[in-house]
Image: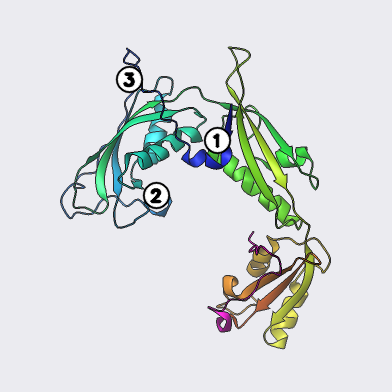
Amino acid sequence: MHVCFAGLLVLLLVTNPPQENSKPIRTLSRPAPAGASASGASTSPCGTDHDFRTDKKRGIVANGVILEGTRGIDTAEMSSIVGAISDSCFDEQEDAVATYVSAEFLQRGYLLAKVEHVRIDIGDALAVPKPATIHADVTEGPQYHLGELRFQGNKAFSDEKLKGVFPLKAGGVFSLSRVRGGLGALRALYGSAGYVDADFSPQLEIQSVVDAMDSPKALIKISVNEGKQYHMGKLQVLGSKPQADALEIRWALQEGTPFDVAYLHKFVQDSRAELPGDFNEQEGLRTFRNCRDATVTVTLILDWRETVGKKLSDTDCEKPKTLQP
């Protein structure tokens, strides 16, 4: 069985309505804070990391979460799932809520979890966002572990090197955040060696269980498109000569060496004493990728305010790509 990894965050398996049988019911809820339902009263802030609304002037905040139907999840893990959903903000739509409930189970290795019969009970229809209690039936299914991590298309680094920077190891419980962190680590590794266009396409394969005593396994295949390797080109410092000379001496990435994307931010942090006190890294540090000779020119603009709002070309490539660590 294969699952497209690009859609894992929004993967929602809501097929096959539950059978009416005597399966055990597991319920956990987090009560709404006192005073949250009074008209016009402030509700629990959801914060930017827990605000999934498409319209910030509407939607709901999950002050209560009741999940029923799970079989094998212990109380601590259920509390963690409920806690992650509680006080989050969503669009007032059952399918939107189900997506994020499903993602929390997916995050913990329950790759085939089904989230069904979502119900949203509004506490105060006039509040923004509306405090609500979320109800859902969940069949979590088996918890999957990583069986194997495979790479294809990689030439600059060996499989062992790539596996070494990937935080999810064979045998570990499948974790979406660790996969996400692993992709970030791969980007950082390739970016440090000049492969600024490196792209990674993961796919997930759920493996058949051979031994009933073994944990269910999932295989991750990552296709690597390394792109060309870029090297450091010219460094230009626009500003007073004394400052420019001091910064050029401090710059350690020599012309012709593989370009290191992360070095840009490190240089700014290490050179605060030589840079203007109000230096803005986003506006004052510019890169230009020359695709023809695979070099990157770096320009430091000490009088960065003169460039604010101006669109400066960052490449002569057909598909521009901003260099970010």
Which circle, 3 or 2, is nearer the viewer?
2
Q: Residues within 10 Å of mark 2 (few under 14, many from 20)?
A: many
Residue 140: quadrant of the picture: top left
Residue at the spot of label 3: 25
Residue 233: quadrant of the picture: bottom right
56 within the magenta span: no
Type of amino acid under label 3: Ile
Looking at the picture, does residue 60 appear above or below residue 283? above
Q: Which residues are magenta?
A: 305-325
Q: Estimate the x, y position of residue 257 in percent, counting from the top left.
A: 82, 63
On the rendered structure, is 136 left or right of 280?
A: left
Residue nearest the viewer, comparing 25 with 316 = 316
Type of amino acid under label 2: Phe
Quarter containing the C terminus: bottom right
**What's the magenta bit mostly, secondary-structure-wise?**
loop
Q: Estimate the x, y position of residue 260 in percent, counting from the top left.
A: 73, 60
Type of amino acid under label 1: Ser
